[in-house]
Image (cartoon, rainbow, N blue to C red):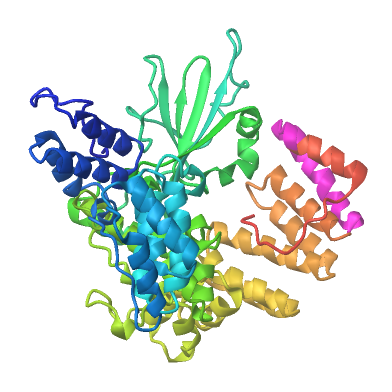
Amino acid sequence: MSQPHGPASNPDNPVGPTSALVDEGWGHLRLQRPLAAWASWQRALRENPGDEAARQALERLENAPELPAAARAQYRFQAPADAAADPGRRERWDARLRGQGLDDLNAAAEVFAGLVADDPDDPEARLNLALCHAWLGRNAEAVADLDRAVTLLAPVDSGRAADAWTLAEVLRFGAGAETLADDFRYAWTVAWSEGEGPPAGLFESWPNLVPVALPSEAGGDVPRPADAQVYEWLDRPVKPTATGSDPAAFQAADLPRVVASVVRTPRVLRLSTPDPSGFAALSDPPFARLAQALNGARRERSPLPLAWADAAVATFKFPAGLDAAAKAALSRAVVEHYYEDLWIHLPRLGLDNRTPLSAAEAAARGDAVARAKLSGVIRFREQLGTRPTHAALYQGYPFDRLRRRLGLVDPADASAALDADDLSCAGAKELDGLDPASLDGPRLVDAFVSASALRDDARTARFAAELAGRDPKLFAALDPATLFAPLVREALREGEPDRALAWLDRAREVAGGPHLQTFAVWSAEVNARTGRPQAALDIYQELLERPGATAALALDGAETLLDNGYADHALPLLLEARSRGLAACDRGVVETSDLLLKRGGTGRGEFTPRTG
């Protein structure tokens, strides 16, 4: 998928006096400045109404299905508002505009800059100056103008303020405004000199690196050498397709995501991703060699093409074998999960470095500017989602669900596509007004999942406590760790370790398989953190007696006890870890055990349950 573009000249039309303006417009569009392209082609038509190349270019831009509506809209100068409240404003406009034509954008920019200098609080002058700068291709200046206009308009006209900020979202992608962008393609490139290569065993030890026939990188404009090997690096293995036509067998949150596209040549390793959270995996021990290799990488970041502004939504990998209906249902679930659970926590320059959730919290406290900017940002995402070229991905996803999650819309006033009784996209205020005990099973599950997405343990624990006390069949589809972790954390935050341990006892009652070890490890951590080292040691030693127990488990227990100041209790676990590490030829465990035997703990901070 690409943005509309054209040749430098059209061989089917004679080159006329306005051909330079037509070429200029295509140049602006290649630099992601659609408003400047529109202005160049409009000027060409003013100078030569018969210029067919300009007319076709405008028609192509206005009907480009891959661009959001705000990038294709026709904008017009606005007249001064509320002249009755400020009679002097009309007089200032008349004085500045007298004898001035606005077809010359540089002259028009001077006029509106003068009006802004006369009255810095004139929102229409600010908006018109922003349009001049956008039409001239000066996107960074236009965004600054719109920022000020939104500040002025938000308290009195939230709709116009949101419209202005929707346009600002488009302008952030343009050349010259790169430092203001929020949606990037990130790339890491490591090159080796002739005769060298990647660290030994790098690719052999790289989990979930899947070869692909073609690169999946959004906006893939990087040349691919003939000898390149291309991979997708997934954050987890692909789950086998148990029931090919049943999307309920797969949870969107459990689907693998592409951490990065990987291109390997004999002398270069290149990773790229549109997801800013993708490389968080590099902090995990399995990727130590990769992190070391990337220490000297050349790092690049460039705004995504407008046509790929939502590329991160498409990083989920679907299981093979789903029929069309099942894949459509799962695709819709992925979009819901991405926007309502993940995207709301990503900081954005367009929200003054706030996350959408924190901007929503500011809006709830009466911050009109935060509300207008958040509304504009969501409106832009909505325009991305309603493009016909993306219909198969979004499956009609109604963005009022996202607005409801962020408290921007009352469920009773939302679109017909939104069910007011559906709590799967409920927001903070709505959840806080619910009594968990009054909810039937499915609505309680939805309320818990929504609360979890907001990442506030105190709120989540209210619903988790009610859910954990009911029939386990009700929450069988949930990850038990997700259900009980907020209960444990909240109990510890309130200084009640016995309650935390009681919840873990309940977790072991209802969980099975690998979760039993997870909850046992959590119990050991709670005991160690709350002055019960012998109880923690007993749990680890019991776990180590089970078949399949690893050296890493012994080392984990030793580190937990050392971190909490119990070196004597950690000693037998360190010796056990070292012994098992030697037997398994696990050099990392052996070296770490030796180091800890010499110097003691590592001083971990706040309790964070591990997966054991």
* Pick the front one: 200 or 67: 67
Magenta segment's dominant SS is helix
Does any portion of residue 379 appear in the rendered image? Answer: yes
Above or below, comparing residue 324 to residue 157 in the picture: above
Q: Position of residue 463 (x, y in %)?
A: 51, 81
Q: x, y (%) of residue 544?
A: 71, 52
Q: Quadrant of residue 380?
A: bottom left
Q: Which residues are magenta?
A: 566-588
Residue at x 66%, y 52% (from the top left corner): 546
> Is residue 319 among what the camera can see?
no
**Residue drawn at (51%, 76%), measured in percent from left and top?**
367
The one of 583 and 177 positioned closer to us in this rendering: 177
**Residue 203, percent across and down?**
54, 26
**Left or right of 351 on screen, residue 326:** left
Check if residue 576 falls in the magenta segment: yes
129 in relation to 366, above or below: above
Q: Please name whichever residue, 61 or 317, is drawn nearer the observer in this view of the structure.
A: 61
Q: Quadrant of the C terminus?
A: bottom right
In the drawing, does residue 305 fall left or right of residue 143?
Answer: left
Residue 219 image position (x, y, % from top left): 35, 36
- Location of the N terminus (image quadrant): top left
Identity of the residue drawn at 38% across and 52% down? 109
Q: Is residue 512 left or right of residue 170?
A: right
What is the tally of numbered marks visible in this picture?
A: 0
Residue 467 is covered by the magenta coloring: no
Q: Quadrant of residue 214?
A: top left
The residue at the far top in this view is 195
Residue at screen point 29% across, 56% down:
99
The one nearer the camera, 572 or 478, is: 478
